[in-house]
Amino acid sequence: MNVPFLPTLSTFFIVLSAILVAIGWKLVRDGKIEAHKKTMLGAAVAAVLFFIIYASRTIFIGNTAFGGPENLKIYYTVFLIFHIMLSTSGAIMGILTINWGLKNKLDKHRRIGPITSVVWFFTAITGVAVYLLLYILYEGGETTSMIKAILGN
């Protein structure tokens, strides 16, 4: 099996981010606030690395179309839209949660933190599922660069 490097690397970082969020959640429950803070910032760095790799690949190389059976394409597309909505809301919630934590607005941070974590776990899980559907379970479809698509080259 020949797995593509950049999608595999970006998926690794999103999984790492979710694992660090889980560890951070446990740390705060145990009262280890400073370790929680460092771990959650590490989770944020992993998520940003994911996004940099994903966005760079999307812009310069392109997105890979679903290469599985045609009768599954609609289900994949609906699932992908759900994942995109989940990841976008999770990223926004993550930025707010981290911001409130760093600014010591702990009432807001404590209220949204657990919800953000759950959303992030589902984001990671659905992201891994998208990766598996695109690159492992089925051979990826055509990949077209965003720049080529825009410029028509």
Image (cartoon, rainbow, N blue to C red):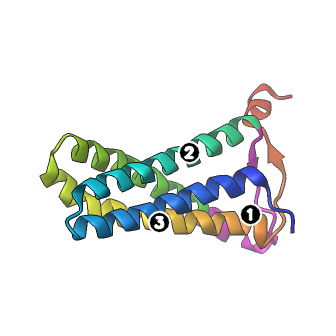
Q: CA distance from mark 1 to mark 3?
A: 23 Å
Q: Residue at 81% across / 60% down in the picture?
A: 140
Q: Which residue is mark 2?
A: 49
Residue 114 locus on image (x, y percent): 28, 65
* SS for callout 1: helix
* Residues marked 2 and 1 touching at CB (< 8 Å): no
Image: magenta residue range: 61-77
- Quadrant where the C terminus is found in the figure: top right
- Whether residue 133 is visible to the viewer of this picture, yes or no, is yes
Q: Nearer the viewer, residue 9 or 80?
A: 9
On the rendered structure, is 52 left or right of 118? right
Which amino acid type is shown beneath numbered disc 2?
Leu
Quick one: label 3 or label 2, which is nearer the N terminus?
3
Question: Label 3 neighbourhood size at 10 Å, few (<14), some (14-19), many (20+)?
Answer: some
Is residue 13 shown above or below 102?
below
Disc number at residue 19? 3
Disc number at residue 149? none
Quick one: label 1 or label 3, which is nearer the N terminus?
3
Question: Label 1 neighbourhood size at 10 Å, few (<14), some (14-19), many (20+)?
Answer: many
Q: Residue at 74% across / 63% down in the picture?
A: 134
Residue 20 locus on image (x, y percent): 43, 61
User: Looking at the rendering, which quadrant does residue 69 occupy?
Assistant: bottom right
Quick one: label 2 or label 1, which is nearer the N terminus?
2
Disc number at residue 134? 1
- Whether residue 78 is visible to the viewer of this picture, yes or no, is no
Which amino acid type is shown beneath numbered disc 1?
Leu
- Quadrant where the N terminus is found in the figure: bottom right
* SS for callout 3: helix
Q: CA distance from mark 3 to mark 2?
A: 15 Å
Which amino acid type is shown beneath numbered disc 3?
Ile
